[in-house]
Image (cartoon, grey):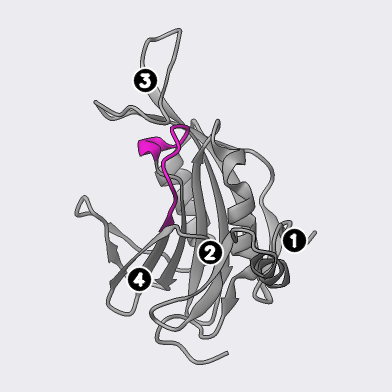
Amino acid sequence: MSRKITLRLGAAALMAAVLAGCAPKYAAYASVRGDFRCLAPWRWKVVTDHEGEHYTDTTFIGPFDPKFYLGAPSLSVRWYRDYASHRLRDGSLEMYTGADDYIRQTLREVYGPQSQLAQPIAQVLVSGIKAEHFVVLSPAPAPAGARWGVLTDPRTGKRFIPQKHAYVVAPVSDGFYVLIYPATDAGYAEHLAQFNTLVNTFFLMKDGPSGAAR
């Protein structure tokens, strides 16, 4: 069954807030590659990284929040071309045959057997595309020195990150987009409205950074 993630503030409400003299919550954003636009959280820092024509990552980084790992809440929009390998920061490679393969590999390789879904994978509409939405709960070992977004297991004394990560995966003609909200269990509700707004205002102008216009 399809469902639409709740939109908390649209463009009309944003304009009304500006006219009323209120500080806006969102700003219109158009990607540097010209492939999508959306409403992004007001004054969040934007960082874009790309590798050729097969991978792009646009990340919006919010103000300090101690409930998040490294104290940095964020939202990301990633583009992957099907069957194209992308080199990760640790030097390893990732490659996906498509959106479904991305979901399978992410649940199996990134989160592993200790993870669980907060709710069943569900279908949502993103820019008129049938996409898959899921939320993963997964404890991850905390790196030495990590302070924010970290808990200690009272039984073992080991420090861990209580990850609660939301995903929306939207396929297009020769690749797919992934919208990600990498939160913690304690911080998840803090910026869920911003993620919902990103998802519901995400509009594709092209099928990928170098793809055909839609």
Q: Report crowding for label 3: few under 14, some 14 to 19, many 20 or more residues within 10 A (C-alpha).
A: some
What residue did someone put label 4 on? Answer: 55
Residue at image mark 2: 40
What residue type is disc 2 on?
A: Ala
CA separation in Å, label 4 and label 1? 27 Å
Q: Could you say whether the residue bearing mark 3 is in a helix, strand or loop?
A: strand
Whether pointer 4 and pointer 2 mark residues with C-beta atoms closer than 8 Å, the reply is: no
Residue at the disc numbered 1 = 4
* Amino acid type at mark 4: Tyr
The type of residue carrying mark 1 is Lys
Q: Earlier in the sequence, mark 1 or mark 2?
A: 1
Q: Position of residue 46 (x, y in %)?
A: 39, 63
Neighbour tally class for label 1: few under 14, some 14-19, many 20 plus, Cα within 10 Å? some
Which of disc 1 and disc 4 is earlier in sequence? Answer: 1
Looking at the image, tell me whether mark 4 or mark 2 is earlier in sequence order. 2
Residue placed furthest toward the top: 155
Q: In the rendered view, would you say 146 is above or below 58?
A: above
Q: Nearer the viewer, mark 3 or mark 4?
A: 3
Mark 4 surroundings: few (<14), some (14-19) or many (≥20) residues within 10 A: many
Q: CA distance from mark 1 to mark 3?
A: 36 Å
Q: Earlier in the sequence, mark 1 or mark 3?
A: 1
Foreground label between 1 and 2:
2
Which residues, given as a range, are shown in magenta? Answer: 60-71
Q: Which residue is mark 3?
A: 159
Tally of numbered tags: 4
In this picture, residue 194 sits left or right of residue 96: right
- Numbered disc in front, either 4 or 1: 1
User: Is residue 65 rendered magenta in the image?
Assistant: yes
Quadrant of the image occupied by residue 112: top left
Q: Is residue 10 above or below residue 64?
A: below
